[in-house]
Image: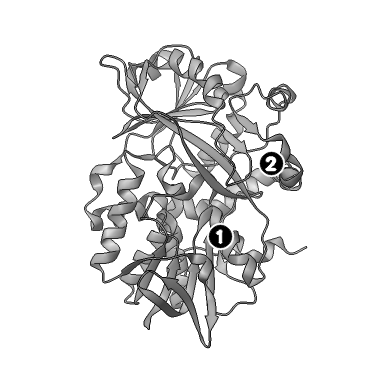
Amino acid sequence: MAHTDIIVLGAGIVGTSIAVHLAKRGLSVALVDRGGPGEGTSYGNAGIIEGNTVFPAAFPSSLVELVRIALKRSPVANYHLAFLPQIAPWLLSFRAASQPARLIATAQVMRPLFARAIAEHETLAAEAGAERHLSRRGWLKLYRTDGAFASQMVELDLAARFGIANVPLDRDAALALEPSLNGVFRHAVHWTGAVSVNNPLALTRAYAARFAALGGLALTGDARSLHRAERYWRVETASGPLDAGDVVIALGPWTPDVLAPLGIKLPLAIKRGYHWHFRAQGNAALSRPVVDVENGYNLAPMEQGIRLTSGVEFAARDAAPTPVQFDRLLPAARALFPLGAPVEPKPWLGARPCFADSRPVIARAPHQRGVWLAFGHGHWGLTLGPATGRLIAEMMTGATPFCDPKPYGVERFAS
């Protein structure tokens, strides 16, 4: 019977970062997943460490955009009709959380995590010998209309209050930064403090290698086997049963599968998203991620090619892929940047675990001694993985947390 101090369930960027931070504090830790590190949700993202983030993604405020989404004509969002009754209560909560005053409140309570995001990544990357995957060139947000740019003034003003660096640019100045772009936009903002990642999978694997170098144990196992075995928590692995006094559940969109048998139900929803790698035509290149704000996609330079990310899709987590958004966004993306042929035959599909208030849960589990939760990071899993790892490791070891963890607790869901 194998035994460790702590079991971490989930080897995405969040779980792997937690395992590293716990191992660095001298604890014996096992990282358990049915797949390899970073092969799930962490694989597919725009590769942006958003230490400069102010507002979360919000419910559309434009009636025109809502009608386009309802008619399935928007590249920003898609949905499966049969799934709407299930997601409707969450969408109403998300709409309420997207009111201006609540967005500002969310920005304030999330700021401590974002403020640590880049530094924590840089520390782990240096320890893991993975600095080559990080670039400090920021990212560009592009606006095709004056109205879209004007709507960002509240965010830019709040960024200034937070001391977050950004540089508004006209079209010519943006093209000087990224000369392969076509001038189909009118305005841009260069968020200079962001760090981009050229291969999120490789970065997560590097952090997992650092965990192994610290003496951590990586095992293949099904987290759904978690159960109480006398005074320990037990998981069945390919190497046999594994016991620990404490367990951290960091399974992203699969977390409810493990919490339900424990009697824990939290209002998590899934936003599905796609990406597809393309070759650039000729000598075209990007040096930083670029987001086309009004069309809801991102172009990011990756080792695999130019990664084109889609808007969100509301559908059952395990439903068959329906990447119809690419039909809507590819014309806009190709008008902006000379995309060539796709690298893979079809897009990749992943699932983002999201709470309606756009905050993760980083906390003790209710009514289950020795169980800790770290999930629900939404669009920010890559960004906040190492900061989450540090915070929960400090909480578990009795150290003074670098920020107040209360805003990320489960008590906020009590009715």
Residue 255 circle label: 1
Name the residue located 31 percent from the left edge and 33 percent from the top edge: 304
| Residue labelled with disc 2 | 98
| Residue 19 or residue 277, whichever sits in front | 277
Amino acid type of disc 2? Ser
Residue 210 circle label: none
Name the residue located 59 percent from the left edge and 53 percent from the top edge: 359
- Is 136 placed above or below 354 here? above
Q: Quadrant of the C terminus?
A: bottom right
Q: Nearer the viewer, mark 1 or mark 2?
A: 1
Q: Earlier in the sequence, mark 1 or mark 2?
A: 2
| Residue 161 or residue 108, whichever sits in front | 108
| Residue 41 or residue 387, whichever sits in front | 41
Is any atom of residue 55 visible in this view? Answer: no
> Would you call the spot at circle 1 few (<14 residues within 10 Å), some (14-19), or many (20 or more)?
many
Query: What distance separates the C-alpha of mark 1 from that of mark 2?
Result: 25 Å
Q: Please tell me whether mark 1 sits on a helix, a strand or a loop.
A: helix
Indicate how the structure is coloured in the image: one colour
| Residue 281 or residue 399, whichever sits in front | 281
